Image (cartoon, rainbow, N blue to C red):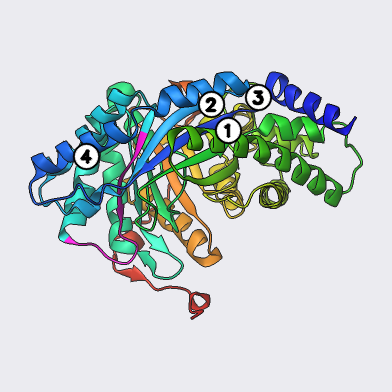
Amino acid sequence: MAIYKDVIETIEMLSKENLDIRTTTMGISLLDCFGDNADRTAQRIYDKITRLAADLVPTAETVSSEYGIEIVNKRISVTPIALAAATQAEDWIKYAKALDSAAREVGVDIIGGFSALVHKGMTKADESFIESVPYALSETERMCSSINLGSTKSGINFDAVKMMGPLIKKTAYLTRDNNSFGCAKFVAFANAVEDNPFMAGAFHGVGEAENVINVGVSGPGVVKTALEGMEGAAADELAEKIKLTAFKITRAGQLIGGEVSKRLGIPFGILDLSLAPTPAIGDSVAEILEVMGLERCGAHGSTAALAMLTDAVKKGGIMASSSVGGLSGAFIPVSEDNRMIAAVEDGCLTFDKLEAMTSVCSVGLDMIAIPGDTPEDTISAMIADEAAIGVINNKTTAVRVVPVYGMKAGDKVDWGGLFGAAPVMEVNAFNSSGFVQRGGRIPAPLHSFKN
């Protein structure tokens, strides 16, 4: 009888509650592709990706069909391209186009890894790479970019932070004919992880194997449904229910990821159990918080509710699999969560409240549309604030904001698909440039010294 009940619950998760495998991401090391000739390096990058990932999409689709569990996205992550040590902007663009062409050839939705790791300092190559990012994002379709500019062990590279505002504003301008969409493919990190399967921040870490399969599972609708009908339950009872639900979701992800891995003959890496919302009705992290008893996401108590949700999800995942990794928790991307959009439009969820909530979510300020005339230094300061939250709290934080060219607070932008639509949020109008322009490095916090 217990087995029968589990089967029925799983069927309902799939058919009614939007349970899916959000992504199957193949990580590929490109360390053996880098050389002193940009054209040869670009060709090696293209050749290796198209060879190793040739069967990724058809295999994932076959497994998805056989098990009846949708795999929404098939993706690739590669070694951070800034390690290629090119010195000219045109070389970086060649690599970006090689990544984009390879992604198109094998049929994946997105490829990540046009990335740099500059959390303690920058080489000359890193600096030229950062300058190339806006052009690379505007001249490619499926390629995503990220930069890690802080860590708990090293502090925050404020010289790199200072460069982020101009990078994002330039990207917004170059992609202005598409609602500045290029910015939706870029994220600035602190404490970036090497095995994240989610975009735009996925890259294949230098400590990873040659080739792995990482899986990202989602299921906000499943958790929301599990909590419905628990009015009057104590907080610890809610946490226990979330934990048990996360366990079931993780087991489904483990099954699918393991099967894709086995059929491709590639090692299984990690399973990222992150509740990642979509614009679909009922597939919302904000709705979970509201089912817990908040009138609207963003009301006082939202940070506490999100903290409990994130922690319970992690605990349930660890019970279900020894391969849980990545970010694992709950994402709060504004444009991709229908109820968060409503909360912003109602005036309940503000930019500052979102920042507070990032201290306990999986990542940080994610997919937020801001006015196109937001100053560069203000954007850099947003990134500095998020990096500080991550560095001090020893967690991953990130910023993915889109200053939509020509739009002001209160306007609405629609990018379609999983990226969704978003109201343009008001930001603090006071100036931060005197702080941002100092550059240098914010030292590592005292509690980083654990050796």
Which of marks 1 and 2 precedes in the sequence?
2
Question: Please, what is the three-letter code of the amino acid marked with disc 1?
Answer: Ile
Check if mark 2's residue and mark 1's residue have beta carbons within 8 Å: yes
Q: Magenta residues, as a range?
A: 111-123
Q: Quadrant of residue 110?
A: top left
User: Looking at the rendered structure, which numbered label has been put on residue 256?
Assistant: 1
Q: How far across and down, in percent of the image, does residue 280 sit? A: 60, 21
Check if mark 4's residue and mark 1's residue have beta carbons within 8 Å: no
- Residue where numbered disc 2 is placed: 71
Could you give the CA–CA distance between mark 4 and mark 2, rounded to whole angstroms? 26 Å
Q: In this rendering, is residue 425 above or below 386? A: above
Question: Please, what is the three-letter code of the amino acid marked with disc 2?
Answer: Ile
Q: How far across and down, in percent of the image, does residue 185 sit? A: 36, 35
Kindly identify the residue that appears in the image at 46 percent across and 25 percent down: 59
Q: How far across and down, in percent of the image, does residue 195 sit? A: 45, 49
Which of marks 3 and 1 precedes in the sequence?
3
Question: Please, what is the three-letter code of the amino acid marked with disc 4?
Answer: Ile
Question: Please, what is the three-letter code of the amino acid marked with disc 3?
Answer: Asn
Nearer mark to the viewer, of 3 and 4: 4
Could you give the CA–CA distance between mark 2 and mark 1, rounded to whole angstroms? 9 Å
Could you give the CA–CA distance between mark 1 and mark 3, rounded to whole angstroms? 16 Å
Which of marks 2 and 3 precedes in the sequence?
3
User: For the residue labelled by badge 3, is the local secondary structure a helix, a strand or a loop?
Assistant: loop
Kindly identify the residue that appears in the image at 33 percent across and 60 percent down: 436
Kindly identify the residue that appears in the image at 13 percent across and 51 percent down: 35
Mark 3 crowdedness (10 Å alpha carbons): few <14, some 14-19, many ≥20: many
Nearer mark to the viewer, of 2 and 1: 1
User: For the residue labelled by badge 2, is the local secondary structure a helix, a strand or a loop?
Assistant: strand
- Residue where numbered disc 4 is placed: 45
